[in-house]
Image: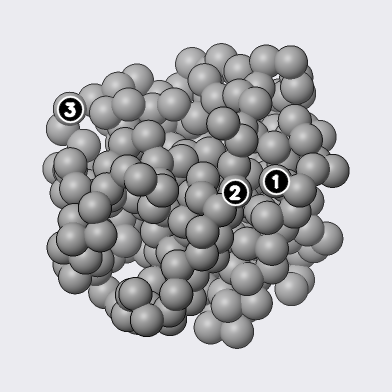
Amino acid sequence: MEHKKLPEFSSWNVEIERVEPRLVAITQPLSNYCEEYRSLRTHILHKTQRRGLKTIVVASTGANEGKSVTALNLSWLLAQTDGVSALLIDSDLRNPSLTDYLGIETDRGLSDILAEKATLKDSIIRLQPAGLHLLPGGDARSDVAELISGPKFREILREARDMFDYVIVDAPPLAIFTDATVLINHADGALFVVGAGKPKYSAIDRVLEQLPRDRMLGVVLNNSKDELKESQYPYGYYYKKRTEG
């Protein structure tokens, strides 16, 4: 993959002591937990490079299933891959949380760009030492579905795709809001995170039936020691990820 020349962005040095402990790519890079995420990264790299995919939505059925933690760990490791540039977008604008997980503070983000109060280049932060780029959510908003469905967000994604090798989008919960379904329709692929013991399989099936199967890159079973068998779901690939706590 040809490495692109990126613009100069504001930089923020992430301090381990301020980071959410479940961000093991930062807090425990030599742990078995982080190795699980490296396996996920390898799967994503192989599948996306083979199919020429660049924008990936990370979604879940409900809240508190580990979606944002998965998006952050995966993106941090993608950015550490030689020759790969990655941008992580916090699109859960009703409850933007990625800056809180990272222990950083920003004064603008996606909601400001959508409101035409800021530009993409001025809102992106380069996180050190990994080199991951982050577009924070900015101020919380209630009119998210209308904003995400509009041409401005499609323009933001096109601009981001032109800059970066990978654009990872942290989406709102699918079963609660329509925003994530709209995001997946804008993206090349989607990764679905399921928290063990959280939603019932029937609820997951109802959500998955609404999604385009050709864009599904896999399902992450989060915080479980038991692997799903392929016969339990129609998507063919399942990745078991163990997390702390």
Give neighbour class at mark 3: few <14, some 14-19, many 20+ (Cα, 10 Å): few
Reply above or below: 64 against 138.
below
Q: CA distance from mark 1 to mark 3?
A: 35 Å
> Which residue sits furthest bottom?
50
61 sits to left or right of 1: left
Q: CA distance from mark 3 to mark 2?
A: 33 Å
Q: Please name the residue shown 63% across and 71% down the image.
A: 43
Q: Amino acid at mark 1?
A: Tyr
Q: Nearer the viewer, residue 156 or 56?
A: 56
Q: Nearer the viewer, residue 39 or 89?
A: 39
107 sits to left or right of 74: left
Q: Are marks 1 and 2 in contact (CB under 8 Å)?
A: yes
Position of residue 58 measured from the top left corner of the image (x, y, whole percent) = 43, 53
**Of pointers 1 and 3, the one earlier in the residue sequence:** 1
**Residue wearing tag 1:** 33
Position of residue 50 measured from the top left corner of the image (x, y, whole percent) = 60, 84
What SS does tag 3 mark? loop
Reply above or below: 237 against 24.
below
Q: Amino acid at mark 3?
A: Ser
Indicate which disc residue 242 carries: 2
**Residue wearing tag 3:** 142
Viewer-nearest of labels 1 and 3? 1
Q: Nearer the viewer, residue 159 or 44?
A: 44
Q: Quadrant of residue 96?
A: top left
Q: Please name the residue shown 65% across and 77% down the image.
A: 46
Is residue 113 among what the camera can see? no
